[in-house]
Amino acid sequence: MIAHTQALARLAGTLDLVLVFVFARRLFRDTTLGVLAALFLMCDPAHFSYSRLASDDGVWAVPFVLGWLIALEAYVETPSRPAIVGAALALGAGVYTQPSAPLLMLLLAIASAVVLRARGILNRADAAAAAATFALVLMPLAVWFAWHPSAYVDTWGRWVLHPAHIRNPVEWARSVTNWLSLSVWSSVFWDFFSPSHLIASATAPAFAGVFLVPVCAFMAVGATALARQTADEFQPQRPVLTMLTVTVIAAAAIAASFKEPRAIQRALVVAPVGCVVAAYGASALWSRRRTWPRVMVALLLVGAIVQFAVFFSTQVSPTR
Amino acid sequence: MNVSTPRDLRGSRSVAASILCAALIAIVGSVYAFRLGEAPVYLGGDEAQFGIHAQSIAATGRDLNGRRLPAFINITDPLLPSVPSGIWYQPMLFYLIALALRIAPLGEALVRSPAVGLAIIDAWLTFVIARRVLKSDWFGVLAAALILLSPAHLIFGRQALDYICPLPFALAWLWCMVSFSETRSRTALLGAGVVLGVGLYSYIASWATMLLLLLATIAVVARSRRDEAALCAVVGAAFLVPAAWSVAWVASHPEALRDTIARYSPSGASGWFTPTAVIERLALYWEYLDPSYLFLSGGSNPTQSTGRAGVFLLPAAGLLLYGIRELWRHRRSTPAALLLFGFFAAPLPIVATLPQSAHGAIGRELTVVAFGALVATAGAAGLWQRSRNGKIVMVALVALLPIQFVPFVRDYFTTYQARSAARFDPSNIRSAADAAVRLDTDRRAPAIYLSATLDDGAVRWRFYTKKIGRDDVWQRTREVRPIDLGAATPGSLLIASPNEPIAARDGWTIARTILDANGRAASLVLRKAR
């Protein structure tokens, strides 16, 4: 059983590489960037580890989020019913993947609607179609909970909304806004973005964090470059870039709601998003057409290969 | 700095604003001074150290270790003064308390009163800086309010600890630098250098903080690109003059430097620049920017935070964030750059040295409160100038400040005192001293033993025997381990923890059980019957 689940995890991990390639290529209109994003994701320590693990939370939601991003990008580029329905389908199906997914997918669905409506891209008919698709995909779950109500308490009751809080929303509001609870949640959320979690961990093999250190350098350049883009340069993709930011924040916030520090397995979607931004950063640095940025790109790529090689050797070592 | 100076709030000095600021300082200042001897409920061990050394300096000009007008005070067990501890404290608060002792006798409120004075000076300095930078008296008042209403500032403004001492120096330096950026006055630069030099003696972390601020001063001078060398020489000389005292003093007391370097050198095998050390430091720095710490919990130590309010009040979060944005937009202006630098550099001394209990130690980065209050004020000014909605948001956030401050203060003076009692003094030595002295008055004890297991027992005992003027009791005091109690003279008194297995043997009987603020047994006063 474990072997089967591990094989499925590897399949999902491999599928992520293909999907991140497609997404980055579509977003930046550049095949090289697609390849680079896929390579970065392939070498991503967190993604690599969870693509080999049979765990409840892990790589399972990532293909669905990437599928949603591809469909979203397609819809932003050319608004069409199939694209938005595809996006809703991906999010709806993603709900079934892992404990942290229901809240994440729900949040991403709401955020997509808000951002696309605010930009005047999503018309009412498409919004209704997307909502109907999302609801339709959740129907089997609703039916299943109706047949097995006792299962709710130990699943969605723990992950999303406890039955007691459905009966008494005031109590739910009180528990959510409780000072200590807010304090713990915000602390776990902030800690998720700690350099010792994302960039380098003192206790991990090869000091690997969620990302490789050189990829983080590319990410910093990429994030700065994307933030500085002139309005017209990325105008069509703006909503998608906004959704990338929302995805990272929502994933970390939902992972933090489980009160477990640094639970990357609950927010692994940040890995492909980071890799896409890093690919753009590498490209932005390379395109400066001066010697030192290109030397820097080369050195960082070599550094990434070396760090991943050391990390990889510890992961596949027979003594592990 | 021309940072978001709201046009509708500019103008001549408003008498009303000045009166309001004075009233604010008087009202909130009275909260700082309210029941100063009773809240914190007990005297902390370090507070007692400050008190007894200051008392000695006031009386004799020497600290308890016999050093005349020391530049650094060696913290030792007063019952074992010849055993060096390797811990040296900066002198400023000792001298301030010694000055206060010229006015009133030793007591908890007296030793804490200089901190209240410093807190009020902070508020006044924040007012004048914000007024000058933002060209508005009203934002000066807001800045003073923001620092006074900061929970961390209130907590440290009521303790006889030197954490609050660097703040007036950091603020006075900032005022000098703002003045220099506007006038290019050498006097202002001279003032900045002197202030930083004197500030070295305020708190141990000031050695890093003041040096960082000195570097910022040099960067500002260098950026001005006019007479850089001469101006750097001015500020360097001004800094070195006060610093020279410590150099001269350390030359004759090299152990002070040796011990301090050993104490604050990078802990463990991690060193400074190994990958592990760098990662650890980055993570620690990140922790100090944690919104939960800054706006919700305020740190991990119950003596430094109530746990129910952050370093800043929660509504200040919005102002602070917007202030960072505003200052970043104006980062080419010297005051804006210095405010951002001061705010983000505050945790650097802790991050660099990684001392014990390095996590969530707001006391060690208290300058963040001063710079944070000014950054938040810049945010308020930016919001005010932005739009009508900005004005509404700003007014709402400012109105929420007292709404959170009032319950915080109520908690501070009531339930927090019980929650934190065991951390300030787990043995309630004050009550134990009262009881023991009363028993001694009833029947003179040949010796008074203090169990060595009591937390800072000897320091607090010395403080209270001084406070009630019973030096004779102190002269008869011995520190003892429970195992050595067999040879004690009958009639002797012993102060011990309630969980020490003493009463059942060697003829010791419980004379008094000392309760803590929660009604639990904190310590025992025993008398030897035979």
Image: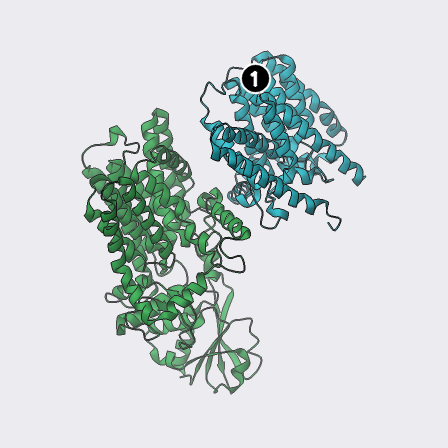
Q: Quadrant of residue A192?
A: top right
Q: Position of residue B420 (x, y in %)?
A: 46, 57
- In this view of the protein, which residue sits in the foreground, B238 or B291? B238
Q: Where B489 falls versus A312 (above or below)?
A: below
- In this view of the protein, which residue sits in the foreground, B37 or B214? B214
How many residues crowd around disc 1 within 10 Å: few (fewer than 14), some, or many (20 or more)? Answer: many
Name the colour assigned to chain B in the rendering.
green
Q: Give the residue number, with chain letter if any, for mark 1.
A: A76
Q: Position of residue A318 (x, y in %)?
A: 75, 48
Name the colour assigned to chain A in the rendering.
cyan
Is residue A19 visible to us here? yes
Q: Name the side, left or right, on which A288 lies relative to B109.
A: right
- In this view of the protein, which residue sits in the foreground, A27 or A112? A27
Q: Quadrant of residue B477?
A: bottom left
Q: Chain of mark 1?
A: A
Q: Name the side, left or right, on which B313 lies relative to B14.
A: right
Q: Where A66 falls versus B459 (above or below)?
A: above
Please give the name of the residue rendered at 28% of the width and 32% of the height, measured from the top-left corner.
B5
- SS under mark 1: helix
Q: Position of residue B126 (x, y in %)?
A: 29, 45
Which residue in the rendered view is the most extreme toward the right? Answer: A1
- Quadrant assignment for the N terminus of chain B: top left
Q: Where B496 falls versus A140 (above or below)?
A: below
